[in-house]
């Protein structure tokens, strides 16, 4: 039987697989794992840790998600929030899907390449205290989703 990490590597989209491999090479270790090949929908949850930085990779019903716990924060935030903080951008929740016939994105945020974004976010988060930028971006996303 494959470990959950090995199973995730086999099933992952190329960009997700590259990110998993990068995390391993960058000194992150798996501290928690659930799901895998015998889980409904093939769901998997991998939590990585390096010093005071955490990364979670989740596959839920065929969609891949990545969340990061910045240094000094106990919670995990989605890449979309952290990218908004890093780029001083505005939240863009996209358009509502009005028909269930449209397929969901396999990797979120849609159109974001994790292999480049995750390492650059981790470097950015480790360079300085980003608490203010992250709090502002989190607030902006919460407000945007209320309007969505």
Image (cartoon, rainbow, N blue to C red):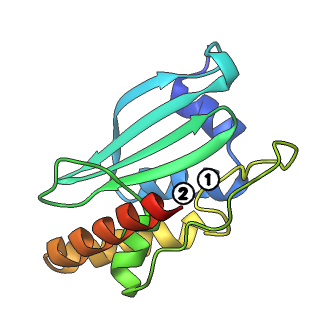
Left or right of 147? Residue 60 is: right
Q: Position of residue 29 (x, y in %)?
A: 34, 42
Left or right of 108? Residue 77 is: left
**Residue plotted at (36% across, 87% down):** 88
Q: Position of residue 23 (x, y in %)?
A: 43, 54
Q: Position of residue 125 (x, y in %)?
A: 26, 72
Q: Position of residue 136 (x, y in %)?
A: 25, 74
Residue that carries the numbered disc 2 in the rendered image: 19
Q: Are marks 1 and 2 in contact (CB under 8 Å)?
A: yes
**Residue plotted at (20% across, 80% down):** 127
User: In the structure shown, which secondary structural element does the residue marked by tag 2 occupy?
Assistant: helix
Q: Residue furthest right?
A: 101
The CA distance from mark 1 to mark 2 is 5 Å
Residue 78 - label? none
In the image, residue 20 sits, relative to residue 46, either above or below, namely below
**Residue plotted at (30% across, 50% down):** 76
Task: Depth check: give the residue in front, 117 or 10.
Answer: 117
Task: Depth check: give the residue in front, 88 or 97.
Answer: 97
Q: Quadrant of residue 9?
A: top right
Image quadrant in which the N terminus is located: top right
Residue 16 - label? 1
């Amino acid at each position: 039987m494959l470990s959950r990490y090995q199973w995730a590597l086999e099933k992952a989209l190329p960009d997700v697989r590259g990110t998993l491999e990068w995390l391993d090479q960058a000194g992150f270790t798996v501290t928690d794992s659930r799901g895998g090949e015998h889980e409904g929908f093939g769901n998997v949850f991998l939590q990585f840790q390096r010093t005071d930085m955490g990364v979670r990779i989740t596959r839920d019903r065929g969609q891949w998600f990545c969340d990061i716990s910045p240094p000094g924060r106990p919670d995990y935030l989605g890449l979309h929030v952290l990218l908004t903080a890093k780029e001083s951008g505005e939240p863009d929740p996209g358009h509502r899907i009005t028909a269930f016939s449209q397929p969901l994105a396999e990797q979120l945020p849609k159109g974001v390449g994790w292999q480049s974004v995750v390492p650059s976010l981790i470097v950015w988060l480790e360079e300085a205290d980003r608490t203010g930028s992250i709090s502002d971006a989190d607030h902006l996303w919460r407000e945007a989703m209320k309007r969505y």
